[in-house]
C-alpha cells in the first residue's frame, strides 16, 4: 500500500510539472530591424540633369534665394541619390536658411549611406554647434577627426564647442591644432585667443589675437566681430573676443 502511494505521488508531481511548463508564456522571437533599401542607380541622363540642378541651386544659394536653392537641390538629390556631395550641399543650404531640423535630417540620411563621409560629419557637427547641441557637436566632430586627423574644420569647431562647455584645456589644444593646419585663417587664432583668455592666460590670449589682427586688420574694429557669428561663434564668445580686443589698445 505504501509503495502504491509513493508511485501515485510521483506521477501526480510529474503531471503538475508538465502542466506548469506548458502553461508558460511563449516569448516571440525578436523582430529584426527593417532593412533600408539602397536608392536605385540613376541613368546617365539623370546624373547629368542632377548636376545641372545642383549648379542652379548653388547659384540661388549664393544669391541668398534659399527657397529656390532648396527646391533645385532637392530635385537634384532625388535624381542622383548616390551623390553624397549633393546631399551635403542640400544639408548645408538648409543650415544657411536656418532650417536646423531639415539640415540635420538631410545630413544624417547622408551618413546612413556612408557613415565615414567626412564632409557630412563636418557639416552636421556645425549644425549641432550653431544649434547649441554641444555634446552632439563634440561627438560628431570627434568622429570626423578619427577618420581624418588633419581635419582643420573639425578641430576649429571642437575648440569652439569645448570653450562653450568650459573645458578650456581641450579648447586650447584643438585651437592650436587648427592654427597649425590653417595658419593663414584668422578664425582659429581668435578661437585660440578666447580659450586662453577664459583660461586666465592673458598673455597668450593677446599674442593669439595679435596674430589674427596681422592676418586681418579689421579685427581691430568692434563692428567687424559680428561676422564671427557666421563662423560658429556664439554671442557670448563674440563678447569675450571683444574683451580680448579691447585689452590690445
Image: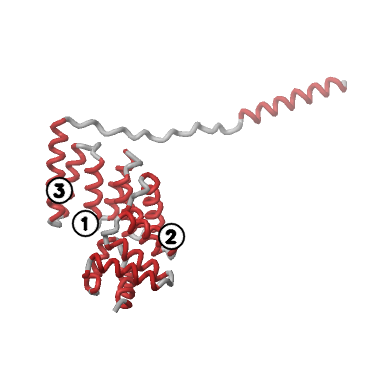
Pointer 3 residue: 57
Sequence order check: which comes first, mark 1 or mark 3? 3
Tell me the quarter of the image containing the N terminus.
top right
Discs 3/2, front:
2
Spot occupied by residue 188 in the image (x, y as percentages of width and height): 31, 61
Q: Nearer the viewer, residue 15 or 246?
A: 246
Which residue is drawn at the image coordinates 22% and 73% (left, top)? 223
Spot occupied by residue 153 in the image (x, y as percentages of width and height): 31, 53
Tell me the quarter of the image containing the C terminus.
bottom left
Pointer 2 residue: 170
- Distance, label 1 to label 3, CA atoms, is 13 Å
Sequence order check: which comes first, mark 1 or mark 2? 1
The image quarter containing residue 243 is bottom left
Pointer 1 residue: 97
Which residue is drawn at the image coordinates 33% and 48% (left, top)? 121
Left or right, 20 with respect to 110, comes to right
Up-down: is 164 above or below 42? below
Tell me the SS state at disc 3: helix
Neighbours of disc 2 within 10 Å: few (<14), some (14-19), many (20+) = some
Q: Nearer the viewer, residue 190 or 92?
A: 190
Tell me the SS state at disc 1: loop
Spot occupied by residue 57 in the image (x, y as percentages of width and height): 15, 48
Q: Looking at the rendered structure, which numbered label has been put on residue 176?
A: none
Amino acid at each position: 500500500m505504501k509503495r502504491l502511494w509513493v508511485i501515485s505521488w510521483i506521477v501526480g508531481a510529474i503531471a503538475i510539472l508538465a502542466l506548469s511548463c506548458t502553461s508558460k508564456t511563449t516569448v516571440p522571437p525578436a523582430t529584426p530591424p527593417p532593412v533600408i533599401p539602397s536608392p536605385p542607380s540613376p541613368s546617365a541622363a539623370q546624373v547629368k540633369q542632377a548636376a545641372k540642378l545642383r549648379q542652379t541651386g548653388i547659384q540661388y544659394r549664393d544669391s541668398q534665394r534659399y527657397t529656390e536653392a532648396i527646391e533645385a537641390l532637392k530635385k537634384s538629390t532625388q535624381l542622383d541619390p548616390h551623390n553624397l556631395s549633393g546631399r551635403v550641399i542640400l544639408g548645408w543650404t538648409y543650415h544657411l536658411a536656418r532650417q536646423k531640423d531639415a539640415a540635420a535630417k538631410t545630413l544624417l540620411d547622408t551618413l546612413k549611406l556612408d557613415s565615414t563621409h567626412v564632409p557630412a560629419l563636418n557639416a552636421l557637427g556645425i549644425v549641432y554647434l550653431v544649434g547649441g547641441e554641444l555634446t552632439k557637436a563634440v561627438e560628431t566632430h570627434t568622429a570626423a577627426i578619427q577618420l581624418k586627423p588633419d581635419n582643420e574644420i573639425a578641430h576649429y569647431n571642437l575648440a569652439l564647442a569645448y570653450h562653450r562647455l568650459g573645458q578650456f584645456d581641450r579648447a586650447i589644444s584643438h585651437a592650436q591644432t587648427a592654427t597649425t593646419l590653417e595658419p593663414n585663417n584668422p578664425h582659429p587664432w581668435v578661437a585660440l585667443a578666447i580659450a586662453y583668455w577664459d583660461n586666465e592666460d592673458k598673455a597668450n590670449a593677446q599674442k593669439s589675437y595679435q596674430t589674427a589682427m596681422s592676418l586681418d586688420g579689421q579685427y581691430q574694429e568692434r563692428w567687424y566681430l559680428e561676422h564671427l557669428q557666421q563662423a560658429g561663434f556664439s554671442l557670448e564668445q563674440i563678447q569675450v573676443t571683444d574683451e580680448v580686443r579691447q585689452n590690445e589698445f
